[in-house]
Image: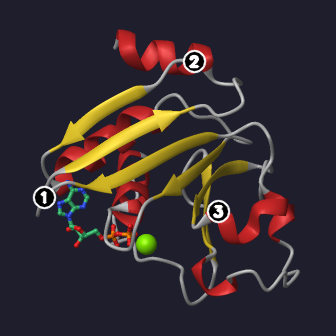
Amino acid sequence: MLKYKVISKSESGTKALAAKITGFLYPGDVVLLTGDLGAGKTTFVGGALESLGYKEHVISPTFNILKCYFDVKPNVFHIDAYRLEDQNIDIGLEEFIEGEGVTFIEWPKFIAPLIPPKHLEVSLKRIGDTEREITVTDPNGFYQDFLKSLEDK
Ligand SMILES: Nc1ncnc2c1ncn2[C@@H]1O[C@H](COP(=O)(O)OP(=O)(O)O)[C@@H](O)[C@H]1O
Ligand SMILES: [Mg+2]
């Protein structure tokens, strides 16, 4: 299984990686973001949106759970499941996941039943004040070509 691992040295390094990955994504793609609070999951989504031309500051949808960006192409759906914990509340997130946009999901473990087998996982680990180890994996083998093109570029 291919794995793509980089050390990001700053917030802008993380955003640059997000931009690179986003360049290969299409509507229907699902990207899980894992890592502790403050690891840089929301920053990563901010980098993805900036690369698509979104100009405003991206904040976590923790309090709304879902934010939809219909003014960028591809559309972006940003889910932060932190506040759902394991409550199994049905708020219709499945309408968005694998729908007409790219979906980024923070704290996917809290909505495990809604995660489709086909997804990428970006895990961020704090290794210093501004250093993060970022690993992009493809747990179920659907994105091997994708990971290969990341390596090649
Ligand atoms: N290399 C880096 N990558 C991402 N964020 C970083 C980095 N270095 C410092 N930071 C800071 O860490 C914080 C990450 O916050 P955030 O993206 O909200 O994390 P999360 O969504 O994982 O809880 C931000 O304040 C950001 O400026
Ligand atoms: Mg966050």
Name which of mark 2 and mark 1 comes first in the sequence: 2
- Answer whether labels 2 and 1 touch (C-beta < 8 Å): no
Q: Residue furthest top?
A: 152
For image coordinates 41% across by 61% down, the residue present is 41
Disc marking residue 1: 2
41 horizontally vs 29: left or right: left
Q: Secondary structure at mark 3?
A: helix
Disc 2 residue lies near ligand 1 with CB under 8 A: no
Q: Residues within 10 Å of mark 2 (few under 14, many from 20)?
A: few
Q: Report the label total.
A: 3
Amino acid type, label 3 = Pro
Q: Position of residue 98 (x, y in %)?
A: 79, 48
Q: Residues within 10 Å of mark 3 (few under 14, many from 20)?
A: many
How far apart, in angstroms, are the residues tagged by discs 3 and 1? 24 Å
Q: Nearer the viewer, mark 2 or mark 3?
A: 2
Disc 1 residue lies near ligand 1 with CB under 8 A: no
Q: Position of residue 103 (x, y in %)?
A: 64, 54
Ligand 1 found in image quarter: bottom left
Residue 69 in sight: no
Q: Which residue is mark 3?
A: 108
Q: Compared to 146, does 9 lie above or below?
A: below
Q: Compared to 152, does 33 lie above or below?
A: below
Q: Which residue is mark 1?
A: 128
**How has the structure been colored for display?**
secondary structure
For image coordinates 76% across by 62% down, the residue present is 112
Amino acid type, label 1 = Gly
Q: Residues within 10 Å of mark 1 (few under 14, many from 20)?
A: few
Q: Nearer the viewer, residue 56 or 32?
A: 32
State which quarter of the image contains the C terminus. Answer: top left
